[in-house]
Amino acid sequence: MSIQTQGNTLTFASIDGDAGLKAALAMKRADIIDTVADSGMKGRGGAGFPTGMKWNFAGAEKGDKKYIICNADEGEPGTFKDRVILTEFADLVFAGMTIAGRAIGASQGIVYLRGEYTYLRSPLNAVIKKRRAAGLLGEDVCGVKGFDFDIIVALGAGAYICGEETALIESLEGFRGEPRNRPPFPVVAGYRYAPTVVNNVETLASAACIFVKGVDWFKSFGTDRSTGFKLFSISGDCAKPGVYEFPFGITVADLLKEVGGGDAKAVQIGGASGTCVPRAQFTRQMAFEDIPTGGSVVVFGPQRDMLAVAENFLEFFVDESCGQCTPCRIGNTKMLEAAEQLKEGTCSAEYVAELRELSGTMQVASKCGLGQTSSNAFMSILEHFGDEIMSRPVQAETARTPA
Amino acid sequence: MLVTQQEKLRADVTALVDRLGPGRSSLIPILQDVKRRHHGVDSDAMQIVADLLDIHPVEVYSVATFYAFLNPAAQGEFVVRLCRTVSCELAGKDAIARQLETELGIAFGETGEDGRFTLEWANCMGMCDQGPALLVNDRVYTRVTPERVREIAAECRAAYSGHAAERKEGYLV
């Protein structure tokens, strides 16, 4: 088992998702949505949009063709929980998709699997085939007359931006993965302009769990505003990296104790688009009301150069920006140049202040989450590790040549 | 491209269009297949795909150049992609990068003259707890050490030198 947990039984392993599917299919459609809404579950991909609300919007739309898309384009640096879920608990994910399909009245489910996970395609197709044979997919699912639902796996082609739901939809339709203007939101006009729910892998798997164990059980984990349990992807300088299940609300310090990263000087939470939390703030909680996260935690040991970390993130964003909005396309390039100047000891504090303004512009003027969040890590590193980063010795001209 | 090759390609793509449907949604799966078989998507291939899907070839070009894995440039039979993102960097990807360049005799972004290997950087491939990680085509290698780079290259070379009937389009597994 490659998911670890604190003492108790791992939730996903202890739950038969198909029991949840059968329980959900015995309910009225509106009740399925109410159950998810009552659970208070928020999207596990990181943005934290209430899942019940999303299903409700799509369910209220008229139209004979609707879609459930499972977002398996897990591209956020430091995140790998969805890979483990898809490898070990694919049935739970498909059960969750089928429940969502029933709830909103969709007949087609699509798993958008990132190109880097091509090796998971055949195993996933095998599971789908098995479910069809067992009557859990196809016509009249589980004997419910008139409920047809099937799932296909579509493959991405190496673009981080396609994890953004409208870019993902563009990609599925055969276009460049450039985010759309919103509104209309995908729940109104998504894939092929039909009402579409795009949910993260873990969200769908957790939804199936709710129908097995009930809303009260789910709410017994986590905090008031971030209910339930969450999978965390832990990597970097710690003794036991891997995927862990914790309730929402766990503090950074407690989490680090569990994974053997007690001497960390900082952690990056939420991937490259998340924030860098310094040791002084390790009492903060992993929850949407404190540090919102899709579950990625990268641990930095005492010896790490935080400027190199910032530079790595910015290189990533320069590479992965789709280039559609100017603040993101140019802004990230300027941020990376500044990180290089800081490394060379040639960046003025005046310019750093300008970068903060630029970061604000990127946040308000970019169309999608990439540009809105890409400067977060650099800004939080500048804020918390200014002493370490500013006024480095000026590099000699010869040493400055890039590799 | 030779006329016979063009005809072969057109037949391949036609078969794909028949299977996937002539809609725009088929574009990316078709390009993935062309890329896998031919290790690149040249202008003839783009024209053929555009004809069969009834879209402008520029549309095909714009999509192919957007996605890292659809890079239209002619690449080697084995595309080696080393993860350069933060966790793999902490795990020591720089040493692996140097060893790959030495072992394969090419720099990042290059394809060897014999057309066997292309070396590229990749962004996070979801193996952050087992870094440094690299992909060879679809196959993932984790906890790569400089010594293992040699084995990985040897495995690819062995697959490449096998008889055409035995190897599957130059693909591992």
Image (spheres, coloured by chain):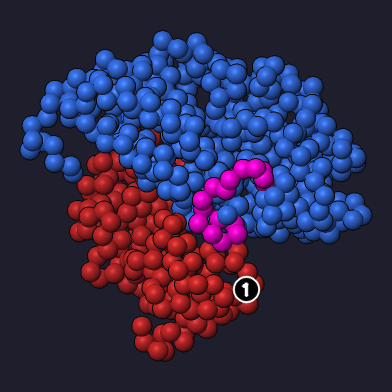
Chain colours: A blue, B red
**Majority secondary structure in the magenta region:** loop
B138 w.r.t. A293: above or below: below
Residue at the bottom extreme of this rendering? B4
Task: Depth check: give the residue in front, B24 or A246.
Answer: B24
Looking at the image, residue A393 sits to the left or right of residue B6; the answer is: left
Q: Amino acid at mark 1?
A: Pro
Give the magenta range. A171-186
Element under disc 1: loop
Near-viewer residue (A178 or A399): A178
User: Which residue bears the numbered disc 1?
Assistant: B22
Return the x and y of residue B30 as percentages of the image width and height: 53, 69
Q: Residue at x 26, y 15 (%)?
A: A387
Q: Nearer the viewer, residue B16 or B66?
A: B66
Q: Residues within 10 Å of mark 1 (few under 14, many from 20)?
A: some
Question: Is B48 located above or below residue A176 in the figure?
Answer: below
Label 1 chain ID: B
Q: Quadrant of residue A217?
A: top right
